[in-house]
Amino acid sequence: MAKRDFYEVLGVEKGASDKEIKKAYRRMAMKYHPDRNPDDKDAEEHFKEVNEAFEILSDDQKRAAYDQYGHAGVDPNMGGMGGAGGFGGGAGGFGDIFGDVFGDIFGGGGHGHSRSSVQRGADLRYQLELSLEEAVKGTTKKIKIPSLLGCNSCDGSGAKKGTSAVTCTTCGGMGQVRMQQGFFSVQQTCPDCHGTGKMIKDPCRECHGEGRVQEYKTLSVKIPSGVDTGDRIRLAGEGEAGVNGGPAGDLYVQVSVADHPIFQRDGKHLYCEVPITFVDAALGGELEVPTLDGRVKLKIPKETQTGKLFRLRDKGVTPVRGGGRGDLMCRVVVETPVHLTERQRELMSELKDTFAAEGEDRQSPKKTSFFEGVKKFFDDMAS
């Protein structure tokens, strides 16, 4: 069966640049890759054809021979240069760029370069619960966290003091090894050095070759005023120690504000309920109410109804991200008297009689309006 033109296989013009050829190869290889087309013989043949075309056209010498003599110029059976169709051979072969295209699938590193043995430490998170007062006013808290710290005995190298790591004999220091899987080669992380390219023959006794040890450390965390649940504070470099001298990660302190027995917070405003007596609600009066700054006087006007909100300006929270201070909203709740004495019951009965004499619609307009609405509702149902 006659072979197709290699440029046609990749879908490029004869004068295509190396970049265009490589881009076209990646597109076609991903399309026909066996992992994407399991048990599809046609796709497998196309995949081999695409690879053969790329191996020839990505090599300047082979491409020149192909352009001048066609398939005969690169077919060893016809006296050509040879090497076409090989998997993993040649400088521009499939094996060299396999990690580039399919590295994410098989864990290859791309072009055989070792990954750096220096790694940044992991970030850590610490959940810190604050009282409302601490969150509103700011404070400094000491926290104790477990963390991987650089080993002092080996200075983080993992090797016993006076020794050092040596080049990995399995991968030759590249951090990657090439394995043959069927008709193609796969580039994988070296199983012995785990991609570092180095091996420790005499490990440190303190960290057992890890270069890091787990310890507890105590930190002082400055909490700015106005923080709220969900805010977090970043402490740079206070996370886990890096590997092989890499930089440490960061510590993120996640803030959670505990419930308060008196106040509820909504953004920069505070809310609280203030119980008042029946007499204060009817006749008016003056009460002391709590704020986070101390007690203040709240004037209750006469005939105050339960649920009424009183605003105390600038008694709330100053937001951590800036802006004016919020307010304290006091919601009054009229409390029905309990444990009445005999004399108090008599007085309440006399008061009730005066209400009836005057007409309840004057003293209790909401009650009168409600029952009028109820009567109309049932009248409408009956009609």
Image (tube, rainbow, N blue to C red):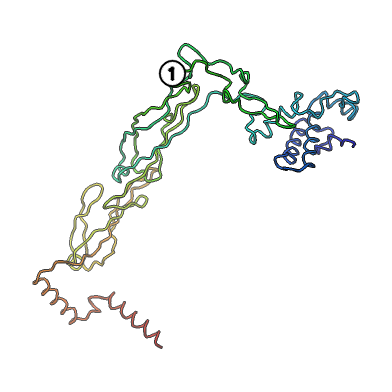
Q: Is residue 64 above or below residue 232?
A: above
Going 72% across and 28% down the picture, which residue do you hit?
Answer: 95
In the rendered structure, the answer to whether residue 220 lies left or right of residue 110 reads left
Q: Position of residue 281 (x, y in %)?
A: 21, 66
On-image quarter of the N terminus: top right
Residue furthest bottom in the image: 383
Above or below — where is 334 with respect to 35?
A: below
Q: Quarter of the image for the C terminus: give it.
A: bottom left
Is 383 in front, or is 167? Answer: 167
Q: Residue furthest left?
A: 343
Q: Amino acid at mark 1?
A: Arg
Residue 238, relative to residue 326: is it above or below?
Answer: above
Q: Nearest the camera: 19 or 89? A: 89
| 217 or 279: nearer the viewer | 217
Residue 368 coordinates in the image, percent (x, y): 28, 78
Nearest the viewer among 119 and 359 is: 119
Q: Which residue is mark 1?
A: 205
Among all residues in the image, which is located at the extreme top? Answer: 162
**Circle 1 crowding by C-alpha within 10 Å: few under 14, some 14–19, many from 20:** some
Q: How many marks?
A: 1
